[in-house]
Every structure is written in structure tokens, then in C-alpha cells.
Image (tube, rainbow, N blue to C red):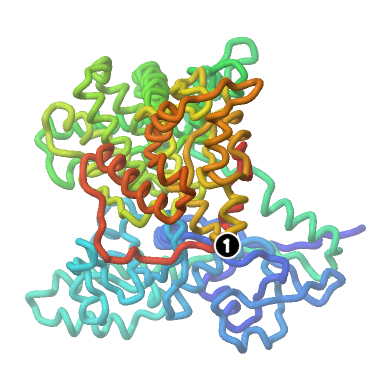
Amino acid sequence: MAGSTFKTNPVDLHELLDECHRGDLQLPDFQRSWVWDEERIRSLIASVSRAFPIGALMTLETGGDAEFKPRPIEGAPIEAGARRAEYLLLDGQQRMTSLYQVSLRDQVVETITPKKKKVKRWFYIDIRKAMDPASDREDAVVGLPEDRRVREDFGRDTILDLSTPALEYENLMFPVTRVFEWDEWQDGFHEHWRGDAHEGVRREFRDFKRDVLENFKRYKVPVITLDRATPKEAVCVVFEKVNTGGKPLDAFELVTATYASSGYELRKDWYGDGVTPGRHARLRGTLHFPGQESGIIAGVSNTDFLHAVSLFHTRDRRNAAEAAGKQGKELPAVSGNRQALLNLPLAAYKRYERQVEEGFGKAAKFLHQLRVYQIFDLPYQSQIVPLAAILADIGDAWEHQANRAKLVRWYWNGVFGELYGSSVETRNARDFLEVPAWLAGGPEPSTVSETMFRADRLKTMRMRLSAAYKGMNALLMKEGALDWRSGQAFDHTVFFGENVDIHHVFPRDWCTRRGIKPAVYDSIINKTPLSYRTNRIVGGAAPSAYLAKLEAGNANTPPIERSRLDAYLRSHLIDPDLLRSDSFEEFMEDRQRRLLALIEAAIGKPVYTGDSVEEGEDLADDEDEAETGPTDPR
């Protein structure tokens, strides 16, 4: 009788990372390169620091029929590649590579930011934040640039300097590169804080070592090992399953299980019962126009909805604590993070569910007013959560012009500041507290005050993956852009009826023939919203040629007076004379200036035109292939 071809063992994390360093544990060569971003690395470090599970690994014992070419974990020394691997890591590459690079390699880590910038980071744990029960552990894990200095005011002011061990000790910032071997760092820390007066600081570190660092040293990872008798077909099937199959257990599933013990069917509430549509279907159909698969808020997930409800509930708890005389760190946080969702009482959900659903409906209306009609063109899905919560909270007050103007300004600051790319829980909570207070006469919310748009950013906005790229297109339509063929404004009827999309002003074919690089002509500066039929007339011709065709008309389109066509072009912030003379460079410079003025008006502040360079470098141009949709290639 055949036996099992695998075994499961808990293995010390430190031992696994040592195996990666030596080359005993390597990757099959068909594994993708390491691609984890900074936020996920921080989350992983935080999980291990709390002894939370990070999932099982799956390895394959080498030497059998399923033999694959091995390669070392990224960052491992050259000697690791010369060693014969004992095991290949089938599932867990990104977790092991991340932990190896941040903890064992003692070199700066290459990663990417939420803005898709390649950067180098050293990771630290803020000792006091890590020991504060009111703080989110992820907030205690920070990434610093290669020189270990954090700067603001365009690089003029250094607000955190950890460039020497003494500065690490002074700021109580523990380097993650020392989580397994901390004796030497501890000796330096105690010497820095020597004396009776600093006994409290030394005690803080002892507590940190016991409650945080010991978790790294004692951490065990479940490892499923396929033995060498496992056939290659089975290995391939397993690899496919562990990389693409299955949905991780999320907060909604756990809350559903909790509410079920009280007899409440949250799943039915969200998905319906097969006869009566659930909340998901109602949101999906909100402002849904004929011919469209779904409405603008169809992407709102069940956890998004719980997040918005949680903001109301946690604010109630905070208000009650304030009324009871508590203050400072005694006050519970307003939050929509995973832990807050898991602690969301059924009574609170029932209290706010209808109000929050109405808030999402108002959010859909708000977005349509800004000429954001479909999910494909939505700058940030994540920004809908605070928008809906705010609108649910202020009720009909959002319809007043002064309030609506502030809400619009807040929204555009979030978009052009590119503030909702990741780790949005804290920002959403601040928005929920700060924006209504701002509407009532309080100070600007941090989303508005923190936004800084760089003038040179327009040149690098080439992908639909960019929130600011989508925002620029919507803002042009909102500010009165008219279709060049019909002269119609882009309301929802025209947008859907005429198949409006973002198209090149100087066509791609024309630019390519003149040796202009895609990095230049694919910029949002050279793009504008146009109907499908107008873009067919534009084709790949020079602007002077397609403008002449528009003026002349044809059997299906009447001629357009030159002065009228010029007015249509100006509505897109385009100088007609530069277009008619095919002056590409002059056009790009002039339109950049006009678009920047439009952004300044939207965010209510000047754009940054200084010479301070933004950290990181743009990803390679082939990332533009990620843009998909109905945009015509010309």
C-alpha cells in the first residue's frame, strides 16, 4: 500500500534562513524573481515580531525524478549557488526572501514603494511603539533610505537620523538586521544609556527583548516537505495550486462566523439568498447605465463595507471614552483595520449598515459629478471607503456648495497626492475625523495639507495604473472639455454612448515615425478624452492633417468652422496654433503648464517646481504594457 509522499515539521525560522544563506535551501529556477513591496515587508516583520503565523512553506527534497535547476534566494552569497541544494522552496519564496534580506544579510534591501518606485531600505522597529499596546505593530516597523536619514521639506530638514549605532540607541530604534544576534547592539545600547538615571530606558529594552526579539529567535514555521519520490507531474500541480489556488481567510469570513453564533447571516446580507438581492448586488447596480456591466461602486468589497461601519463604531467608543474623562493614549483609536473589523459587534453593524450603504450611494453620485463614470477610470478604489463614510456622516450637508467644494478639493488632493496606494487604514480614519471637522470650520485635513504635486510628475504619468493619470482625464472632462467632432460635453450620456476614452493628441504612429520615444509621447500631457468616432478621424496622421479633415467634414460628419474647432481644442487646454503647426515640443511644454494650472486650482495650492529630485527611479517602460482597455493604439 502506497504511503504519503510528504511530511510536515515545524522548523526554526533562523535555521531556515541559515539554510538559505548556505544554499541548502534554494529555489527552482522557474520561480519568479522576488517582487515584494515595502508595505508587505513591514507587515511580515510585524507578524513575526508578534509570533503571528505567516503561513506554511512547501519544499521538495532534491535527488528524485522531479529534478529542477536550482538558484539561490536573492541576496544569498555567491558560494550558496555553488552548493548542491538539499531542498527546493516551492511555496514561500517571497516570505523567505524578504525575511532573509531584512534580517540575516546585513545589507540594504531593494524594494518598491506604493508609487512603483524602486528604492533601497533599512528596516527598523520603533521600540516604544512596539511596546505600546494602543499602537498597531505595523506602524512600529519603519523603512529608512540607504543613508538611514528621513528628510522633509524637499530634503532640507532631517527629521530622523539613524546613520550611526549611537543614533539608533538615542532614538530607541532597533535594526531588524540584529533580530537574531543582538548581544553586541545591546552592549552598545546599555553603554549609551548607562547610569542610574537611565535605568528606565534600559528596562524598556529588556522588555522589548523579552516580548519582541525573543519571538524572532523562537519562531517556528510549518514546513511541508515533498520527498524525492514525488513525481514531477505532482510537483507541478502542487506548485500551481499553492501559487494561484484558493482564497485566504479574510476578515469578512471571520466576522460572518462570529455573527452566525448570534443567528445573523452576514453572508446572506451581503450576497442575497438567491431570491432577494443582497447588499453587494445593490451597490453593484448603483448608477448603473444601460450597456454597462456594473456601476462605479461595484468594486466595493464586503471588507470595505465593514471598514466603513467600523469607523462609526470605533468613533463612538472614542467619544464615550472622552466623555468618561480619558485622554491621550487611554483613548481607543478610530480604525477600520483587520483587528477592528474582528471586534465589530453585531449591534454596531446593525446600527450603521443602512446609513453606510446610503453613504456609498452618495459616493457614486459624487464621483459621477466629477466625471468618474466607470471602475476602469476610478483613480483609487480605496478612497471610496472614507468618501462614503464621510458622506454617510454629514448627511444632506454634502449638497451645499461650500461643503461640496471642500469635499472636491479633498478628493483631488488624495488623487494627485497619490496618497491611497497602500496602508490606507490610518489615513481613512484621519479623513473620517478631520474632513467633517474641516467642513464645520476646523483646520485642513492632513490629506489636504500633506499633498505635494511635483510639476515633473506629469511627464511620468503614462499608465492607467496611475491614480493621477486617471484623475487628470476626469478633471479635464469635469472642467468642460468638448469632443472635437461633435462639440458635446462628456456627460454620462455622451461618455457611454460615444465610447469616450483617453487618446493621444499627437498620434503614436506620427511620433514613432519621428523618433520620439514612448516615454515622452505616452505622457498624459499628450493625451486627452475623445470619443471613439473622433479618434478614428484622428488616426495616425499629423495634427495639421486630422484638423483639416475635421474642418472639411465628410458624408457622415458636417464641416466644422475653424474658430469653433479652435474653441473645442482650447477646452482641452490645447493651443490650436501649436497643433496646426505640428509643433510637438512646444505643445508639450505649453500643455504641461496649462495642466499644472488646472491641478493647482483643483488641489488649492501651487505645484512644486523646484529642483529637488523625488526618491527612487521609475520602473522600466515595459511596465506600460500593464495598461489595458479600449484605448486605440494610435
Q: Is residue 426 left or right of residue 622?
A: left
Q: Residue drawn at (23%, 42%), measured in percent from left and top?
A: 448
Q: Nearer the viewer, residue 189 or 568?
A: 568
Residue farthest top in this picture: 275
In the rendered image, the vertical position of residue 578 relative to residue 349, given as above or below: below
State the image quarter where residue 84 is shown.
Answer: bottom right
Badge 1 crowding class, 10 Å Cα cut-off, few under 14, some 14 to 19, many 20 or more, is: few
The reply to whether residue 259 is visible in this rendering is: no
In the rendered image, the vertical position of residue 448 relative to residue 453, given as above or below: above
Residue on which the image places disc 1: 515
Q: Nearer the viewer, residue 380 or 523?
A: 523
The quadrant the C terminus occupies is: top right
SS class of the residue under badge 1?
Answer: loop
Residue farthest left in this picture: 197
Q: Could you tell me the amino acid type at mark 1?
A: Gly
Residue 365: x, y in percent?
Answer: 40, 20
The quadrant the N terminus occupies is: bottom right
In the rendered image, the vertical position of residue 439 relative to residue 593, given as above or below: above
The reply to whether residue 572 is visible in this rendering is: yes
Q: Nearer the viewer, residue 478 or 481?
A: 481
Residue 587: x, y in percent?
Answer: 41, 50
Q: Is residue 140 left or right of residue 159?
A: right
In the rendered image, the vertical position of residue 296 relative to residue 618, given as above or below: above
Residue 588: x, y in percent?
Answer: 41, 52
Residue 63: x, y in percent?
Answer: 81, 77
Q: Residue drawn at (51%, 58%), measured in percent from left and top?
A: 519
Q: Is residue 414 left or right of residue 378?
A: left
Q: Which of 221 and 91 is in front in this view?
A: 91
Q: Residue drawn at (37%, 30%), measured in percent from left and top?
A: 308
